[in-house]
Image (tube, rainbow, N blue to C red):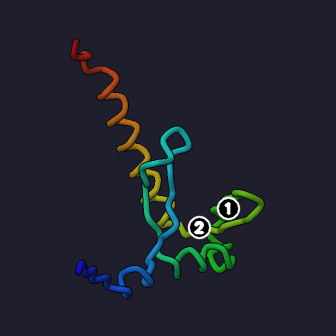
Amino acid sequence: MKAHFIDLEIILKLESKPWVVDKNNPNVPILKIEKSDFNLYQSGIYKSHGNKLSFNGKTFWLPNEFMNLLKVKTKKLKMREQTREQMPKKP
């Protein structure tokens, strides 16, 4: 007799997080956002910060701190990509 033990808590417990991705490479997240933060961005609570993002017919208002972090992460990502492009290709 073969028996399989499956932990249902792992299967049922999904902790998915929204991602911010590069449109050219959407398989790798630039940032992962907590669900609670994502809901705040969507609710408009940070509207006074003026960082509007429209995506897929929805409007998100991002706080300045998040925008600054996003700018730093995307700049680092671009630098990494440029470095890879400049490296000689292996035959």
Seen at 30% across and 20% down, the residue is 86
6 or 55: nearer the viewer: 6
* Residue 58, image x, y percentages: 74, 64
Residue with the mark numbered 2:
62
Which residue, as the protein is rendered here, is positioned at the far top? 91
> How far, Cα to Cα, is label 2 from label 1?
6 Å
* Left or right placement of residue 58 versus residue 28 in this view: right
**Mark 2 neighbour class, 10 Å CA radius: few under 14, some 14 to 19, many 20 or more:** many
* Left or right placement of residue 13 versus residue 22 in this view: left
Seen at 25% across and 81% down, the residue is 3
Q: Is residue 91 above or below residue 5?
A: above
Q: Amino acid at mark 1?
A: Lys
* Image quadrant containing the N terminus: bottom left
- The label shown at residue 52 is 1
* Residue 85, image x, y percentages: 34, 23
Seen at 40% across and 80% down, the residue is 11
Q: Is residue 7 above or below residue 70?
A: below
Q: Amino acid at mark 2?
A: Leu
Q: Are the residues tagged 2 and 1 within 8 Å (C-beta)?
A: yes
